[in-house]
């Protein structure tokens, strides 16, 4: 069971757009399994996008609200409503911030075998899906916040989103 390191805010790979998967074969299964094993082996994890383990492919694995999805080349077909709620990220552990999302989304994706799926989800799962699809396009939740700061879940420390934006700015040199 291969588990890999999760990349944190500040690494330029999180600002890069992932490439679509073109071929569904054994090599893809190995990549999906790496993301899956890393996700399942991480406490309080809901989902993990390929960028977060330095793989620039359109793949995300979701294990949330008693549902499990491996989404390849996911795309939002329809969205409606507004949902404002708290969100965190495995690439910035311990903190969360208030983010504006769509309440409802219809998503098309492919499973690892190349079969097309279309699902509709609302609320928390819709939020999770939007967060993940953003990752695959180099977008982080701090780009969609409705407050100026994120808050540490245990000690209440606040960090300014403006500072995090600078830390995670595209093209920033390490
Ligand atoms: Zn995230």
Image: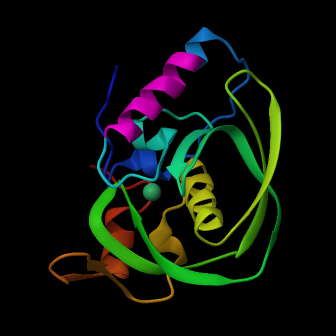
- Give me the residue at 33% from left, 55% from top: 44
Q: Position of residue 153 (x, y in %)?
A: 25, 75
Residue 10 placement: quadrant: bottom left
Left or right, residue 165 beside residue 25:
left
What span is in magenta? Answer: 29-41
Left or right, residue 79 beside residue 96:
right
Front one among 121 and 170 = 121
Front one among 66 and 76 = 66
In the displayed structure, would residue 33 be above or below residue 120? above
Residue sticking out furthest to the top: 26
Quadrant containing ligand 1: bottom left
Residue sticking out furthest to the front: 66
Residue 137 colored magenta? Answer: no
Front one among 108 and 7 = 108
Residue 37 colored magenta? Answer: yes
Left or right, residue 119 beside residue 159:
right
């Amino acid at each position: 069971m291969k588990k890999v390191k999760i990349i944190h805010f500040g690494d330029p790979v999180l600002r890069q757009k992932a490439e679509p998967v073109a071929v569904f074969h054994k090599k893809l299964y190995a990549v999906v399994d790496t993301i899956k094993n890393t996700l399942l082996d991480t406490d309080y994890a809901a989902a993990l996008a390929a960028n977060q383990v330095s793989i620039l492919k359109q793949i995300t694995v979701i294990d949330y609200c008693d549902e499990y999805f491996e989404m390849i080349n996911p795309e939002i077909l329809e969205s409606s409503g507004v949902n404002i709620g708290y969100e965190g990220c495995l690439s910035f552990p311990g903190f969360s911030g208030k983010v504006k999302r769509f309440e409802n989304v219809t998503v098309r994706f492919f499973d690892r075998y190349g079969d097309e799926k279309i699902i509709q989800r609302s609320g928390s799962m819709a939020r999770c899906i939007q967060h993940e699809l953003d990752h695959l396009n180099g977008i982080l939740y701090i780009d969609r916040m409705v407050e100026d700061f994120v808050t540490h879940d245990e000690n209440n420390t606040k960090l300014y989103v403006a500072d995090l934006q600078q830390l995670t700015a595209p093209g920033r040199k390490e």
